[in-house]
């Protein structure tokens, strides 16, 4: 179960409504008891939930970027080790590597599979041709020891990146985040003891919480909102341009 970042926008009107409902509920009570300790504990728990969820999303976002650099390094290492193969086999494999690097671009433009059919086909073709070339006459004696492990790492990192996109907190965490946002808004409205409304503070609270939840979901799901990690493509563009 995924949560689209746009769902956080609905928090703003919902929290404003609950703030007003909480305020009216408090005014209708003739003898409302003070419970600042309980209110403080609930707000503190909500703050911790929001902070840890945001921190975890940022951590996974950084993991995506780190894996991009790691994959580019793996492709670059395997490409350099093509020098161990016979000269006649190198041009075809070098072109396959350029095509493979191109296939790893634009993975964050939309909600798509991390490993495309084109990438899978090129992986299979590169592996077969490399094995054949590494065992052919004229290949360096260490070709199979150095090139094939590098190719294996280049292929394995794609599965690692794919799995990282499915590593999200359980749905209950985000459901609790939305529930605490609404509950805290009602409780904040309940603490208002005056007849007048303080719209500035009510809007500020609702806007701050909604924006933070929205930012968390944007970072957590970088393929569904405005954040797409498109700048990471430059890493592969630079790598492809260096392949000559």
Image (cartoon, rainbow, N blue to C red):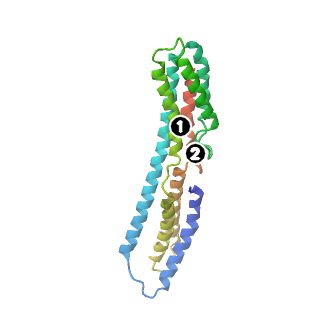
Asked whether residue 230 is in view, the answer is yes
Residue 237: x and y, percent?
A: 58, 31
Instruction: Locate the N terminus by quadrant.
Output: bottom right
User: Within the image, what quadrant is residue 99 found in?
Assistant: top right
Q: Is residue 129 above or below residue 123?
A: above
Residue 157: x and y, percent?
A: 50, 36
In the displayed structure image, the side of residue 43 where residue 212 appears, left or right: right
Q: Residue furthest left?
A: 37
User: Within the image, what quadrant is residue 4 found in?
Assistant: bottom right
Q: CA distance from mark 2 to mark 1?
A: 18 Å
Which residue: 55% across, 48% down?
222
Q: Residues within 10 Å of mark 1 (few under 14, many from 20)?
A: some
For marks 2 and 1 on the same chain, the one whose residue lies earlier in the sequence: 1
In the displayed structure image, the side of residue 108 where residue 186 appears, left or right: left
Which residue: 47% across, 44% down?
62
SS at mark 1 in the image: helix
Label at residue 158? 1
Given residues 96 and 73, the one toward you in this image is 96
User: Within the image, what quadrant is residue 103 found in?
Assistant: top right
Mark 2 or 1: the one toward you? 1
- The residue at which mark 2 appears reads as 228
Residue 15: x and y, percent?
A: 54, 69
Q: Is residue 231 above or below residue 19?
A: above
């Amino acid at each position: 179960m995924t949560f689209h970042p746009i769902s956080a926008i609905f928090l703003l009107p919902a929290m404003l409504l609950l703030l007003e409902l909480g305020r009216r509920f408090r005014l209708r009570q003739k003898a409302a008891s003070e419970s600042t300790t309980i209110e403080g504990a609930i707000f503190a728990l909500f703050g911790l939930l929001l902070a840890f969820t945001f921190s975890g999303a940022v951590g996974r976002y950084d993991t995506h970027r780190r894996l991009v650099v790691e994959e580019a390094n793996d492709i670059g290492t395997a490409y350099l080790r093509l020098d161990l193969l016979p000269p006649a086999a190198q041009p075809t494999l070098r072109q396959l590597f350029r095509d493979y690097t191109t296939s790893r671009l634009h993975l964050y433009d939309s909600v798509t599979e991390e490993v495309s059919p084109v990438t899978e086909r090129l992986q299979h073709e590169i592996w077969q041709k490399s094995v054949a070339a590494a065992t052919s006459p004229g290949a360096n004696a260490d070709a199979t020891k150095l090139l094939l492990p590098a190719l294996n790492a280049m292929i394995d990192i794609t599965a690692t990146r794919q799995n990282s996109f499915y590593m999200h907190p359980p749905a209950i965490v985000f459901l609790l985040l939305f529930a605490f946002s609404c509950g805290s808004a009602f409780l904040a409205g309940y603490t208002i003891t005056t007849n007048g409304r303080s719209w500035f503070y009510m809007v500020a609270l609702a806007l701050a919480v909604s924006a933070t939840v929205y930012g968390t979901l944007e970072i957590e799901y970088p393929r569904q909102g405005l954040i797409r990690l498109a700048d990471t493509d430059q890493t592969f563009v630079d790598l492809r341009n260096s392949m000559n």
